[in-house]
Amino acid sequence: MSDINLAGIVKSDAYKSLASKRKRISYTLTGVNVLAYSIYVLCMGFAREFMSTPVGAGPMNIGIVMVIFLIIFAAVISGYYVWWTNKRYDPALKQLLSSINEGSK
Amino acid sequence: MKYLILLTSWLLLSNNLFAAEALTGTVEKQPLNTTAITMFLVFVVTTLLITVWAAIRSKTTSALYTGGGGINYWQNGLAIAGDFISAASFLGITSALFFIGLDGSLLIIGVMGSWPVILFLIAERLRNLGRYTLVDVVSFRLKQRPVKLVIATASLAVLTFYLIGQLVGAGKLIQLLFGLDYIFALVIVSSLMIIYVSLGGMLATTWVQFIKAILLVIGGGITSFLVLKYFNFEFGKIFTSAVDSHPKGLASLQPGIGFKQPLGVVSLGLTMLLGFIGLPHVLMRMFTVKDAAAARKSSFVAISIMSLFYLMVVVIGFGAIAILNDNPETYYDAAGKLKGGGNMVAVHIAHFVGGDFLLGFMAAVTFATILAVVAGLTLSASATIAHDLYRTFAGDKHSERTEMIIMRSSVVGVGVIGILLGIIFENQNVAFVTTFALAVSASVNAPILIASMYWKNLTTRGVVWSGIIGLVSSIILIVLGPLVWVNVLGNESAIFPYGYPTIATLPITLICLYFISKFDNSDRAKQDRAGFEEQYIRSELGIGAADASNH
């Protein structure tokens, strides 16, 4: 594959729409993750009473629930991203590359 | 402030607290632990056999640095998780939860928060753009020599300081768990590390880390299962009992008993989030798999394992509050201090729920952990010296053969320097060492790496100056902060109030990076910006990336 061809692929509308979909997903997920992390860190620093609000009858509180939630959350959003890129993005990219390649021959 | 300092020492390295305790003389050499030593010897023999196997396959620089890019994604994922779950994560974070309750969770969520960012923004582009190190990626479209020199220096600073912390900790820990002499322990760790890395390269290093990660997850799994069983599998009971037993009562489950200063918490949060993203020895693992998709899958395996492991740590850490405090005669000494020092919580718990066998197992796994992490650090440091520095500066005189010799000698050099520094630092308070490594990673490596991949206007001049300024300001603020100014130099109060300087150093680096690049009108800057398109194509499509080996 020549360089000219590669640059052509990147400039094609089909690629652009696929790439923007991909960007939207990775940026949104990054944003959600950083937001969740920031809320936790800021609450640990500045909203200590809120974190101490009891949940249920025992001594469990919002802080502990948030910690357990965030540990699991990181794995869940990562799993979603890997699922999406493997099942949706990669096959679409592969198809796009091979169709452009054939078209240029 | 006292807690802040203590916590810093708990972070990642169990050792630092030992160093602090060593000053007051509370570290005692334990009687020889035969179960632990036997299990550890089995681990050593197995990994040495793997090293022989790996050495036969490691005849090129590519094989030494990255295992030829032919490592399985799930093995690599476990090895990545292993890099993060160092002896300290297990011992240090369990202890943090035990002593300061909910505040200790900051150390867990920092790791969990950083990994998704690596996956979403960095893993694939890094794999597509680089060959062996993150320096490759940053310098992709920039002027090679100055950029490589600055980023390699920052990487080496991170790795060396991380390594010193690990080695001092290793010596103390092994003295405690195995009843071996400090220097003897140091020599064992360094020698094994030299053998693994110089002969077996990345292949052996990955296997060592991979096996250890499995052992650690098994050990953590058994321990947390038995802790849950002790509480009749009632999750809530762990916290009810903790409140009853913790000296601070209900406050132990609330924020604020460990970290008093709110802005200190924010600075810690930033240091962890970005610091873990920029660790050179972890990012290097992205180059060991065959392509970007495999790098992505490795990251997911790593995150899942860490998620599972830290849930176990939550159970063990909070469970320990009730268990250890309810059995003071076994686990506390006459002075009312935890036997063996502040980092022994996990070890005591293993002993309580699983007897001598589980204690021995966990001690052996801890030793293996230190060894595996130290090997990864050394590999990354020697790749930086041989690939990023020698290869770039030798120019035409470069040869593959010399590069391999230099890489292997760097390994030996790092090992020997490690022993020497370990001896020098034996009785020093080394808490600042790890903080420094993470702060440089968070203030220099991570922001510059991300900018190099995503920001078109980044220029050589911007990287060089912001890198130098970020590095220097991190050093200055750590020296002026409580960890060095008060703890090491013995002054009354710190000039810079926070142990973690990132809250100040990160903005400094970002501002320099932005403005110097933005107003850079040199010819080189035009070239740098023009190079972005080619870099973008390659980072997205992965075409042109070095092909993975077949074996």
Image: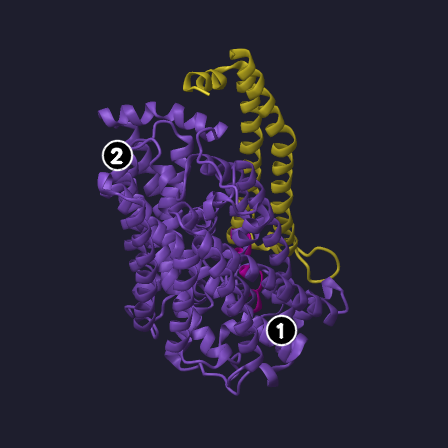
Q: Are marks 1 and 2 on the same chain?
A: yes
Residue B124 counted in the magenta span: no
Residue B106 counted in the magenta span: yes
Which portion, as a residue range, is magenta?
Answer: B97-110
Disc 2 residue type (three-letter): Arg
Q: Is residue A22 above or below residue B49?
A: above
Residue on which disc 1 sits: B350
Most extreme residue toward the front is B56
**Label of residue B461 in the image:** 2
Label 1: element kind: helix
Q: Residues within 10 Å of mark 1 (few under 14, many from 20)?
A: many
Chain painted purple: B
Disc 1 residue type (three-letter): Ala
Front residue of B397/B215: it is B397
Residue B50 location in percent, x, y?
51, 60
Front residue of B426/B244: it is B426
